[in-house]
Image (cartoon, rainbow, N blue to C red):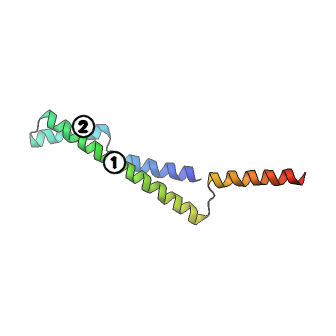
Amino acid sequence: MIELLEKTVLTAVGAMTLTQKKAEDLIQELREKLDISEEEGKAFLQKVQEAASKNQEKMQEQARVEVKKACERMGVVTTEEFDKLKKKVASLERKLK
């Protein structure tokens, strides 16, 4: 449940970032409109991509935190907690035999 929710949120975050093709289209448009050199365009594109990457990482971390909080509020058990419970049940079963 948690993993599905997290993957869904992260997919949405990833879809919001600039794709390589869109970035290249943007730089071509800027080159035409602003009459900048190819080198200036590439430098600008690099800056945009770096900013988008940093922003995506921040958004992914925020999404993870929010998913974790939502799961805690709903009472969803983490994988770690579930594994501990399984071990405890197995231990109790062995004691009963």
Indicate which disc, 1 or 2, sits on the residue closer to the N terminus: 2
Q: Which residue is mark 2?
A: 24
Residue 62 lies, with reference to residue 54, above or below; the image says below
- Tell me the quarter of the picture where residue 76 sits: bottom right
* Local secondary structure at mark 2: helix
Q: Nearer the viewer, residue 39 or 84?
A: 84
* Closer to the eye: label 1 or 2: 1
Disc 1 crowd, CA 10 A, few/some/many (<14, 14-19, 20+): few
Residue 65 lies, with reference to residue 14, above or below; the image says below
Left or right position of 86 against 9 = right
Q: CA distance from mark 1 to mark 2?
A: 19 Å
Q: Amino acid at mark 1?
A: Lys
The residue at the point 48 percent across, 58 percent down is 65
Residue that protrudes farthest toward the top in the picture? 38
The residue at the point 53 percent across, 62 percent down is 70
The spot of residue 75 in percent (x, y) is 62, 63
Left or right position of 20 against 57 = left
Residue that protrudes farthest toward the right in the picture? 97
Q: Amino acid at mark 2?
A: Glu
* Local secondary structure at mark 1: helix
Disc 2 crowd, CA 10 A, few/some/many (<14, 14-19, 20+): some
- Tell me the quarter of the picture where residue 38 sits: top left
The spot of residue 83 in percent (x, y) is 68, 50
The spot of residue 21 in percent (x, y) is 29, 37
Kindly indicate whether the residue at mark 2 contacts the one at mark 1 (C-beta within 8 angstroms): no
Q: Which residue is mark 1?
A: 54
Residue that protrudes farthest toward the left in the picture? 35
Left or right position of 55 against 84 = left
Q: Nearer the viewer, residue 18 or 91?
A: 91
The residue at the point 61 percent across, 55 percent down is 78
The residue at the point 51 percent across, 58 percent down is 67
Q: Nearer the viewer, residue 39 or 27?
A: 39
